Image: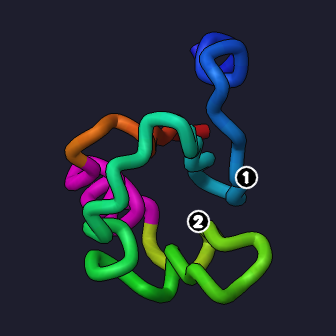
Amino acid sequence: MSDELIDAGYRCYTGDRIDVYFNAARCQHSGNCVRGNSSIFKLDHKPWITPDNAAESEVMRVVKTCPSGALQYRNK
């Protein structure tokens, strides 16, 4: 399924326990990710998504708040 996300234009941000996928073309800039947990999603940092900065359950919780579907995750 992760190959399908890559083929659909998502970029993978790899973590030890979970990977987060982001598609800039789908993003509606609601800010739910950054407001949801700024230790995972840091706009002024490269890479801007660091899945290992929080528990797997926290990453899943924040990603699920994305209204556009621009964020997805895959457990390892």
Crowding at dot 1, Cα within 10 Å, few <14 / some 14-19 / many 20+, comes out as some
Vertically, is 70 above or below 55? above
Report x, y in % for residue 38: 43, 86
Amino acid type at image mark 2: Pro
Q: Which residues are magenta?
A: 56-66
Q: Is residue 37 left or right of residue 4?
A: left
**Quadrant holding the N terminus:** top right
Q: Residue at x 26, y 62 (%)?
A: 30
Report x, y in % for residue 3: 71, 15
Q: Which residue is mark 2?
A: 51
Amino acid type at image mark 1: Thr
SS at badge 1: loop
Q: Residue 27, labelled with which disc?
A: none
Q: Residue at x 34, y 35 (%)?
A: 69
Q: Residue 14, labelled with which disc?
A: 1
State the image quarter where residue 51 is shown.
Answer: bottom right
Disc on the earlier residue, 2 or 1: 1
- Residue at the farthest right position: 46
| Disc 2 and disc 1 in contact, CB within 8 angstroms | yes
Vertically, is 64 above or below 16? above
Report x, y in % for residue 33: 35, 67
Taking the magenta stretch, the answer to whether it contains residue 30 is no
Vertically, is 45 above or below 40? below
Q: Residue at x 29, y 39 (%)?
A: 68
State the image quarter where residue 42 is shown.
Answer: bottom right
Taking the magenta stretch, the answer to whether it contains residue 63 is yes
Report x, y in % for residue 16: 70, 58
SS at badge 2: helix
Color encoding of the figure = rainbow
